[in-house]
Image (cartoon, rainbow, N blue to C red):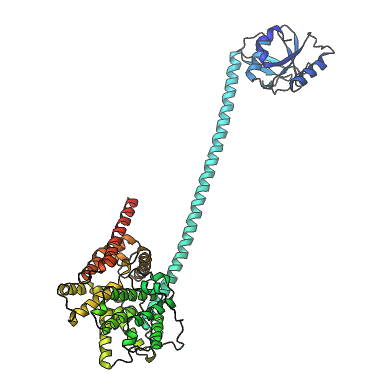
Amino acid sequence: GTHKSLKGNARALSTVTAIIDGTGSVGAAVGPLLAGLLSAHGWDQVFYMLMTADFLALLVVFSRFCSPCDIKELFCTAMGLPRNTSISLLDSTGAMVSIDPTMPSNSERSPYKVVPLTGGQLADKEELFQNVLTQVAEQFSRAFKINELKTEVTNRLAMLEKRVELEGMKVVEIEKCRSDIKKLREEMASRNNSSFLDDTKKLNPRRDVPSYPKYHLSKETIDALRQPIFDVWQWEPNEMLSCLEHMYHDLGLVRDFNINPITLKRWLLCIHDNYRNNPFHNFRHCFCVTQMMYSMIYLCNLQEKFTQVDILILMTAAVCHDLDHPGYNNTYQINARTELAVRYNDISPLENHHCAIAFQIFSQPDCNIFSNFDSEAFKQIRQGTITLILATDMARHGEILDSFKQKVENFDFTNEEHVTCLKMVLIKCCDISNEVRPMEVAEPWVDCLLEEYFMQSDREKAEGLPVAPFMDREKVTKPTAQIGFIKFVLIPMFETVMKLFPQIEEVMVQPLRESRDRYEELKQIDDAMNE
């Protein structure tokens, strides 16, 4: 049972196993009884000798869940002291023992002594405690300062490493720039010492004709070829060559001008070989322009209004109009003072070059599809073809369109000047007609053109030449590149042609308006995202 003076502190005890006399002797049955109680309640077999104020000795075991405060109150009660009395627990050597459930057990030979603390002792203890706290605080402060110092040192080391890395990268970039500048200087020196373009490149016709198979075009393909919506991306070079060959046969040009079919094949192969692999100005662009011309001939019933010589000139000029294009426009040629600009006195250097390459190819007997023409007829073909190719220089756009507008109200198909002006406008329409086609066909051409523009502007920056804003990759986007071109170049020109051929409105002019609207919507989205 629990002693009456300890009942108020029973929560601190696991059990009081025995009450013994002042001699400390314990009955023989106490040991087994204590062990049984401990075992039954799952307590650790750590027990204490507690001598109360009336000299009763108790064997006590504390619950592991009791608090130091509970034990202190128990000691105060046993000593007959108020519960809130400050006490110290001393062992037999006078050393202070921490009052908590884990303190070592005592015995008769090693008793603990409870000592109430006076005001002075409390002050000393408080001072000692404050000193200890101060020392601990200093240690923590020192530790934190060390950690802060470590962090600062680590950060500074990281900054230094980053700076060293950046300096190293700068050295690498400087060396790369030096290497690029050296290569560019060598290229410019080489270009200045020789022709910008090799006039003899690939001009010799192939002898191994036919070197591409004769494709049998389906009726669906033949019909589609006559439509402006024709998808030019679905065909391999050999297939495009076969389509071009078909156009010359279908229009009656091979029959009417007695063109040798093998010569036609050789000529087309040589044409293919003399278009460069530029992003935009390549053989597929040649095919694209020629197919659009072919579709306009049918759409506008031009064979009823033009002579076959005019039809031959239209088709041949379309095929040859960008031969050996270097991928850099006339502005670059003139500003960079290239061999072409010098040769042609800054006057349409590219278009003059395309004409020159075209007739160098015709000068090869195996490629001369005009071999059965007399000199006067050939002169007419040559002059007509050159006139149309030179008309594709966009620097002349305003001049040519204004001339056509003056003639269109009273157009006379028997007037040679009127017909020549119309042919110039027609090849211009075909040359820049990509937006007439469906969006999925037209849009990839925008990407190709911008890629070529960006190549030129990068080179112009490297050479210190002027850069047009519409070619600068840092300033232009697809919508901004197309909106102005469609609104102020394409639509006005096609609407002028529409006055002469109203049938083109639905299949050519309306798609241009829809394309303009689509790009304006895209621009609004871009502007909203950038706000």
Q: Nearer the viewer, residue 210 or 201?
A: 210
Residue 346 appearing in the image: no
Q: Quadrant of residue 510?
A: bottom left
Q: Quadrant of residue 374?
A: bottom left
303 sits to left or right of 49: left
Q: Quadrant of residue 11?
A: top right
- Residue 378 vertical placement versus 419 (above, below): below
Q: Nearer the viewer, residue 59 or 481?
A: 481
Q: Residue placed farthest to the right in the image?
A: 28
Which residue is depicted at the point 81% across and 14% down?
A: 30
226 sits to left or right of 94: left
Q: Nearer the viewer, residue 201 or 11?
A: 201
Which image quadrant: the N terminus?
top right
In percent of width and height, residue 423 lies at 24, 78
480 sits to left or right of 110: left
Residue 197 appearing in the image: yes
74 sits to left or right of 236: right
Which residue is depicted at the point 34% across and 52% down?
A: 530
Q: Residue placed farthest to the bottom in the image?
A: 374
Q: How many marks?
A: 0
In percent of width and height, residue 87 lies at 64, 15
In percent of width and height, residue 306 lies at 24, 81
Which residue is depicted at the point 56% across and 24% down?
A: 130
